Amino acid sequence: MARRSDHSREELQRLILDAAISIIREGGKESLTARRVSAKTGYVPGTIYNVFGSMDALIMHINAKTMDLLYHELSKPEATKKDDVVENLLKLASAYRKFVADNKNFWLLLFDTSLPDDRIALDWYQGKVDKLFELIENILSPVMTKGGPQKLRMVSRILWSSFHGLCYLEEKGQFRTVGKSTNLADMTELLVESFMAGLQNNKTFSKA
Amino acid sequence: MARRSDHSREELQRLILDAAISIIREGGKESLTARRVSAKTGYVPGTIYNVFGSMDALIMHINAKTMDLLYHELSKPEATKKDDVVENLLKLASAYRKFVADNKNFWLLLFDTSLPDDRIALDWYQGKVDKLFELIENILSPVMTKGGPQKLRMVSRILWSSFHGLCYLEEKGQFRTVGKSTNLADMTELLVESFMAGLQNNKTFSKA
DNA sequence: AATTAAATTGAACATCGTTCAATTAATGGG
DNA sequence: CCCATTAATTGAACGATGTTCAATTTAATT
């Protein structure tokens, strides 16, 4: 039997979280099981409920780590910021695509539809989402001063949704008929270039 | 006990399908259960396996009906086709948003990530997806002759992904910080108008 | 050393999808 | 008309799931 002071509360939490992450990494969310997690940690299913309260709560913490990693990855290309807005957006989209490819199971879990709606009520969760939106806002803001913050938020969310939608339908395999020469990068490029060009002629930009 | 000739094979299939649809309509995919379906039909869980083989197969048939209904709904506004491409696209997007709102549980089931990947291999399934893409292609084709069919497919899939991404993040409640005055319709409009305007200056269109 | 508090456990509960031998009903032949 | 064959239907069972909780074991406190 695992002894009470083998691990502190924080150690135990990390232990369970790491075990769950390892399980999802290799088997996806279908393979995440209270009994499997507890077997990997040397504890027992009940321990997860002592620490996290429920499997959904555990998943929520996994998603939190996923979003932190996503933010970290997407912050990198922004460091090498150019003056070209379109180029910066394409770099961001490219980093997002790479993240999706490298962390597919976690990305799928993040957007799983069967999670409780209480998630929406969690402020810290929405805060992480907003921080991701801000990455696009920061790229856009230098050239978008006419429309005010409201329009800036709109545009950033439009772009973000489109990036996500492209990755999502790609993952669902619904782009097969486009042909192999046409890939996600090409579609993203055409989207960003056209959309941003169209925005300019829409009295939204401050400078060409 | 249900007698052998109470229902023909086709009647039984329809009976089960309708029961499952009714269950999902009011409780979402979480409430769909072999035992619940069989209880509603007056049969027994094993009967579902005689007719459909598995619960996943049953869900696949539900998704097929969902896509048929979606195609039917999206075909309507196209009937009142104007000359304005942007207006036609916005009508299509609006119809899609209405469909999502009216059939949320079925829409969520359609894009559930936990379905087997064999679905991708089903030709009739991909055929229904392609037919939806064609709705956008038909709107675009009158004004997009320069880029060839390859570009037409790209643009249609970009728009479709963007529509979907907007609805998806909206459903996930991640647009709360945009403000109540800014809704999906406004974002869709800004997206379509800007994107199409940008495309025109990209030597893709045949006429202004 | 004895008492209290906390952590850990293992068994149990109600479900789930799925399988399958047994039972029941319809069919066809003599 | 009855019996044998075939097909549909059933109910019980299996392994697995999330979750709860009383009992046990351990650490801390008096």
Image (tube, coloured by chain):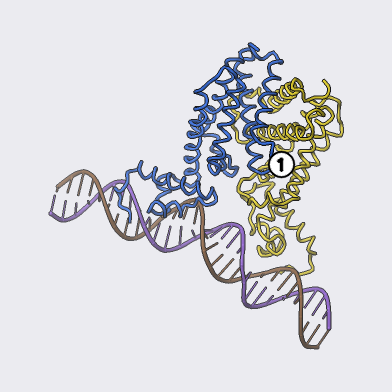
Chain colours: A yellow, B blue, C brown, D purple
Q: Which residue carries the number 1 mark?
A: A103
Q: Quadrant of the N terminus of chain A?
A: bottom right
Q: At which x and y percent is residue A132?
A: 77, 40
Q: Is residue C4 above or below residue B156?
A: below
Q: Camera-side residue: B173 or B52? A: B173
Q: Quadrant of residue B192?
A: top right
Q: Secondary structure at mark 1?
A: loop
Task: Name the outermost residue toward the front.
Answer: B181
Q: Camera-side residue: B170 or A149? A: A149
Q: At which x and y percent is residue A64?
A: 74, 49
Residue at left offset 48%, top offset 37%: B64
Q: Give the left or right position of residue A84, taking residue A120 as reference.
A: right
What amino acid does circle 1 point to?
Answer: Asn
Q: Is residue A175 above or below residue B3?
A: above
Q: Can you see residue A148?
A: yes
Q: Give the left or right position of residue D19, taking residue A91 as reference.
A: left
Q: At which x and y percent is residue B205?
A: 65, 14
Q: Is residue A41 above or below residue C6?
A: above
